[in-house]
Image (cartoon, rainbow, N blue to C red):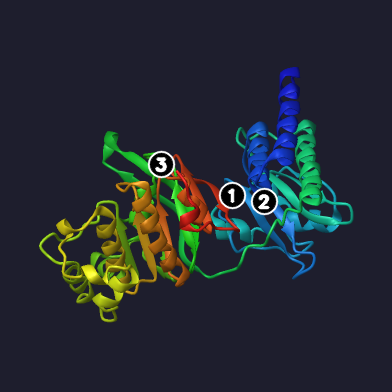
C-alpha cells in the first residue's frame, strides 16, 4: 500500500475514534463509522452483526450499508461465515464466498445480492464475542490486503470499546412477515437510443405493519419504485410479490383489483374531486370496495368530521391532505403509499398531517413514504436510501420519534 493510502487509513481510524467518543447518538456514529470503512477500502457493502447472547443465541444484522435487505434474517453461531467468526472469535478473509463451504448461500437467494469476497472480524468486549463486522465485495474486484483487514479490526475494536463504555444496545431485528418483496426489479422508459433505465436492480422486502421511509435525490427511482408497488406501473424485469402473489407482469384487470382492494394512496397534490364534498369524495371510493370503512368514521379518524359537507376549495391544504388520508383509509388497505405528502405544506401543517399518519401506523397499517425531508425519516421503523436506481443503504430505527418531536 502507498504512503498516501496508509495516511488515509490512519485518518479514518482517528475519525472513527472521534465519532464513537463524541457523537450524541452512538447508533448514528457506528453507522457512519461503518460507512467510512466501506468507502475507504472500496467495498460494496458492510454489516454489523449483533449476537443475542442473553436471548435466543442467534446473530442478527444490526446495521448495514449497501448490499441486500437483511431485515428479519439471522444466523446461528457456527452458521455461515459471520456465525463461524462469532463462534470462533477469529478474523476471517474469504476470497470466493460462493466456493466457501461455510457460506450461507440462502442469504443471497433471499436478498438478491451476490456476495463474492469478504472480511469478517469479531466484536469482542471484556468478556465475550458480542457480534462481528463484515466488509463485502471490493468494487474493483481486487482482494482485501493486510491493511484493509487491519482497518476493519480497528473498527471492531473501537466499536466494542464504545459498546462497553457507552452502553449501546446493538438490538435485534424482528422477523415479521414480508408483505412486499422486490427482487432485481428494473424499469426502463423509452425505446432504442432514447432508453433510460431508472431502476437498475432493486432488492427490498417491506415488513407487515412497518413504517418505511424512502429517501434519495431526484431521479434516483423513488417514485418509480412506489408506482410499481402500487400497481400503477409495471416493471421491465425482475419480480414483485405482494403477500406471496406474483404481480410482476399482471394484466390490467388484476392490477385494478389489487389497487382497489389492497392499496391506499396519498399524493402530494391531494387529488380530491373539486365538485364533491369531503364526505362524497370518500363515498365515491367506498363504493368501489366490497369491504370499506364508512366515510364519517374515516373523517372522524383524521379529525375532520365537522368538515364533511365542505368542498376541497373551502379547506386549507392541511385539511385537504387529511381528507386524502381518510380517503385512503376508507378502503381498509393492507398498505398505504404516500408520495411527498407534506411537500406542499408549511411546518405546522406538516406536523398536523404527520400526527394523523402516526395514528395510522399505530393501528398496524403498513406505510411506505417517499420524501425529500430527512427529518421525517426519524419517525420510520426503517429508512431506505436509494441512489442510482438501487437501494444503497438500509437504516434501522429502533427509537422512532413522534411527529411532534420533528423540527425543520
Quarter of the view holding residue 274: bottom left
Between discs 3 and 1, the one toward the N terminus: 1
Residue 49 picture quarter: bottom right
Marks 1 and 2 close (CB-CB < 8 Å): yes
Residue 38's place in the image compared with 367, above or below, is above
Q: What residue sits 23% from the left and 70% below the top?
A: 306
Q: Nearer the viewer, residue 25 or 382?
A: 25
Q: Residues within 10 Å of mark 3 (few under 14, many from 20)?
A: many
Quadrant including the C terminus:
top left
Tell me if residue 240 can be seen: no
Q: Is residue 380 rendered to the left or right of residue 94?
A: left
Could you tell whether 308 is left or right of 238 in the image? left
Q: Which residue is mark 3?
A: 220
Observer-nearest of 184 and 23: 23
**Quadrant for the N terminus in the image:** top right
Q: Label 3, label 1: how many angstroms apart (C-alpha)?
A: 22 Å
Looking at the rendered structure, the secondary structure element under dot 2 is helix
Dot 3 falls on a residue whose secondary structure is loop
Q: Given this view, does label 1 or label 2 mark the residue nearer the observer?
A: 1
Residue 101 % position (x, y): 75, 56
Q: Are marks 2 and 3 in contact (CB under 8 Å)?
A: no
Mark before the other along the chain sequence, 1 or 2: 2
Measure how far apart labels 1 and 2 are at the Cα level: 9 Å
Residue drawn at 63 percent across, 45 percent down: 28
Q: CA distance from mark 2 to mark 3?
A: 30 Å
Q: Residue 114 bears which disc, if any?
A: 1
367 with respect to 148 (left or right): left
Q: Would residue 374 be visible to someone looking at this image?
A: yes
Q: Which mark is residue 98?
A: 2
- Tell me the crowding category of disc 2: few under 14, some 14 to 19, or many 20 or more residues within 10 angstroms, Cα based: some
Amino acid at each position: 500500500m502507498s504512503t498516501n493510502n496508509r495516511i488515509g487509513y490512519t485518518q479514518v481510524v482517528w475519525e472513527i475514534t472521534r465519532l464513537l467518543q463524541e457523537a450524541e447518538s452512538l447508533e448514528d456514529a457506528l453507522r457512519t463509522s461503518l460507512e467510512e470503512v466501506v468507502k475507504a477500502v472500496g467495498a460494496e457493502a458492510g454489516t454489523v452483526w449483533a449476537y443475542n447472547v442473553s436471548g435466543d443465541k442467534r446473530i442478527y444484522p444490526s446495521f448495514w450499508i449497501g448490499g441486500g435487505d437483511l431485515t428479519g434474517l439471522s444466523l446461528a453461531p457456527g452458521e455461515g461465515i459471520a456465525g463461524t467468526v462469532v463462534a470462533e472469535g477469529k478474523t476471517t478473509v474469504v476470497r470466493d464466498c460462493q466456493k466457501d463451504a461455510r457460506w450461507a448461500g440462502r442469504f443471497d437467494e433471499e436478498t438478491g445480492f451476490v456476495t463474492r469476497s469478504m472480511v469478517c472480524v469479531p466484536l469482542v468486549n471484556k468478556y465475550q464475542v458480542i457480534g462481528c463486522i463484515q466488509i463485502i465485495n471490493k468494487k474493483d474486484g481486487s482482494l482485501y490486503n493486510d491493511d484493509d483487514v487491519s482497518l476493519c479490526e480497528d473498527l471492531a475494536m473501537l466499536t466494542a470499546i464504545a459498546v462497553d463504555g457507552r452502553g449501546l444496545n446493538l438490538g435485534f431485528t424482528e422477523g415479521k412477515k414480508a408483505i412486499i418483496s422486490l427482487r432485481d426489479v428494473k424499469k426502463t422508459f423509452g425505446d432504442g437510443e432514447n432508453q433510460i433505465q431508472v431502476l437498475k436492480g432493486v432488492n427490498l422486502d417491506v415488513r407487515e405493519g412497518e413504517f418505511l421511509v424512502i429517501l434519495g435525490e431526484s431521479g434516483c427511482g423513488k417514485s418509480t419504485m412506489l408506482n410499481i408497488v402500487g400497481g400503477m406501473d409495471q416493471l421491465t424485469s425482475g419480480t414483485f410479490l405482494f403477500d406471496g402473489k406474483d404481480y410482476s407482469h399482471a394484466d390490467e384487470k388484476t392490477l385494478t383489483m389489487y389497487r382497489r382492494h389492497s392499496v391506499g394512496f396519498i399524493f402530494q397534490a391531494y387529488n380530491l374531486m373539486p365538485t364533491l364534498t369531503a364526505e362524497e369524495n370518500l363515498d365515491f371510493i367506498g363504493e368501489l370496495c366490497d369491504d370499506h370503512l364508512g366515510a364519517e368514521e374515516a373523517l372522524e379518524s383524521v379529525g375532520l368530521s365537522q368538515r364533511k359537507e365542505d368542498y376541497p376549495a373551502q379547506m386549507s391544504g392541511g385539511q385537504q391532505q387529511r381528507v386524502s388520508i381518510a380517503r385512503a383509509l376508507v378502503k381498509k388497505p393492507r398498505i398505504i403509499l404516500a408520495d411527498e405528502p407534506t411537500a406542499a405544506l408549511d411546518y405546522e401543517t406538516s406536523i398536523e398531517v404527520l400526527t394523523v399518519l402516526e395514528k395510522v401506523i399505530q393501528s398496524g397499517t403498513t406505510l411506505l413514504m417517499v420524501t425529500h425531508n430527512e427529518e421525517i425519516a426519524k419517525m420510520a421503523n426503517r429508512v431506505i436510501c436509494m441512489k442510482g436506481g438501487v437501494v444503497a443503504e438500509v437504516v434501522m430505527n429502533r427509537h422512532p420519534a413522534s411527529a411532534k418531536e420533528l423540527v425543520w
